[in-house]
Image (cartoon, rainbow, N blue to C red):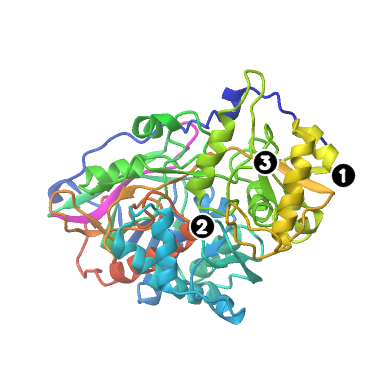
Amino acid sequence: MKPSISIKRRSLLQGIVAGSIGSALAGTVSAAETNYSESHDLVIVGSGFAGLATAYAALKAGLKDILILEKMEAFGGNSCLCGGLMSLPLSPKQKALGITDSVELMVGDMYKAGRGFNHPSLARKFAEDAASVCGMLDECGVELKDKVIRLGGHSTPRALVPASASGGGIVVPIHNWLKSRGVQFRNRTQVTELIVTDGKVRGVRVNEGYDWQTGKSSRTKTIGTKGAVVVCTGGWGQDNSFVKTTMPAYALLECTSQPGATAEMLRALLKAGALPTMLDMYQLGPWASPDEKGAGPASFFADYAFAEGISINPKTGNRYMNELADRRTRAEAQLKVLTQSDADKINYPIVFCSEKTTEHAEGFKAAYRDGCVFRHSTTEDLAKAYDIPLDALKKQISEYNEIVAGKKQDPFEKPLDVKQKLEAPFYSMRLTPKLHYCMGGVAITPKAEVISYETLKPISGLYAAGEITGGVHGMDRLGGCSSVDCMVFGLEAGRNAAALVETRNVGTQK
């Protein structure tokens, strides 16, 4: 099958513009003005990995009255949509397979990918606590495959793979475990404001019955907390207005996030006094395809094709990057290939591999079914599909096979955990970077406390975890680390927030 290559440039790069953003409300409210409609020990905003981990830790610490708020119809956010890969050092599976790793090696890889912009205390907290998330996964019944794979930028295989090869395979069992133990989940509830009195976050203002497509809701109410509010709402990649204001160069890039990934909670945090950090830094996903919306099964398959195949510039037939470099390095290399496009045809870089790789690669069957991955019976068929110079392509395949056989050194120094020879039939996909992750956010301490821009100290009663925060990964993050970041700091937030529960009476609005 030959892919269509005549799609207009703008239609391929145009991102989904998110629905309306919550209106800017005052960041502080006096105690006299607020009578809460209801009150809970702990209020968590966001139901993805970070929110679930927060609730788990708080429940284990003894809290009984925990409320998780989610503005969308479905729970889980981007966590449900992602591949669910979890890159962490010193996991039981890594040890069982005899894979050598360490906290120091993990931190070193994070610093290299983050270009040294990582906040040292947060990066170390991530690496030191990462393996602790395995206990929660086991207790909540999350099933993992019996393998550990290497993603780009990692010095060693670290990524755990859910049995279902999706984030839903993590979210659903933890959600069910928490719900069976009394944690309350409430969807279509948009938080618009953090209520701060006497220097402490005391609750939230919400729109109930919220419809993200219209921006309408049925009513507004306030919800109080006896302990803390933990914000776990993720990034804002679908908030095109916010993205193009902070990083104009990315204004037309498609985003991989779900439609609810907008900036209203970031605005609420800033209005409540949170210190911002690196809000103009974004990550581009180098495994994305123009032939699928967002990041689907083809993006998952690409990780295997990168590891066991090669990526080439169709104009030259040659490799142009280390296929397992960090995400920023690969995305920038792909953008250079794209600049060689003609007026009537975009020069998408491609990645291809042998049929042997497709036999164990997650995402392959769905991507092939959906027309994002293409089969080529011969080298000639592959060259014809993408107008690649045939002689150059044959030479490149031959050179790579010599590298695999150990007869030649790889000029790109790609690590080869699986030495797979390239031979027909081949399976290929087109590549284009998409906006994938918000590197910045609000500043937090290693205890997941949100830092005040005014005092540079923690804001009492306010915690955050996951993509809404910044600093852990610096300028760019490694694959499979977002999920672990959410869980590490979610668990930390849950433990610390549980200790803040006060035995005070909260007024109830009639």
> In the picture shown, does residue 15 fall above or below 117?
above
Answer whether residue 207 is magenta in the image. Answer: yes
Q: Where is residue 262 in the image (x, y as percent from the top left)?
A: 42, 39
Residue corresponding to mark 3 = 318
Q: What element carries label 2?
A: loop
In the rendered structure, find residue 153 and report the number of the disc placed on it.
2
Res. 48 visible in picture: no
Please tell me which of labels 3 and 2 falls first in the chain. Answer: 2
Q: Which amino acid does label 2 sit on?
A: Gly
Q: Is residue 445 left or right of residue 396?
A: left
Q: Position of residue 464 (x, y in %)?
A: 33, 57
Q: Comparing marks 3 and 2, which lies closer to the viewer?
A: 3
Q: Is residue 100 left or right of residue 446?
A: right
* Number of numbered callouts drawn: 3
Q: How far apart are marks 3 and 2 (CA)?
A: 22 Å
Q: Which amino acid does label 3 sit on?
A: Asn
Q: Comparing marks 3 and 1, which lies closer to the viewer?
A: 3
Determine contact: label 3, label 1, CB under 8 Å.
no
Res. 81 visible in picture: yes
The quarter of the displayed image where residue 198 is located: bottom left
Crowding at mark 2 (Cα within 10 Å: few <14, some 14-19, many 20+) = many
The residue segment tinted magenta is 199-214
Q: Position of residue 337 (x, y in %)?
A: 58, 34
The quarter of the displayed image where residue 508 is located: bottom left
Q: Which amino acid does label 1 sit on?
A: Ser
Residue at the location (29% across, 65% down)? Answer: 121
Q: Position of residue 491 (x, y in %)?
A: 39, 68
Residue at the location (21% across, 43% down)? Answer: 27
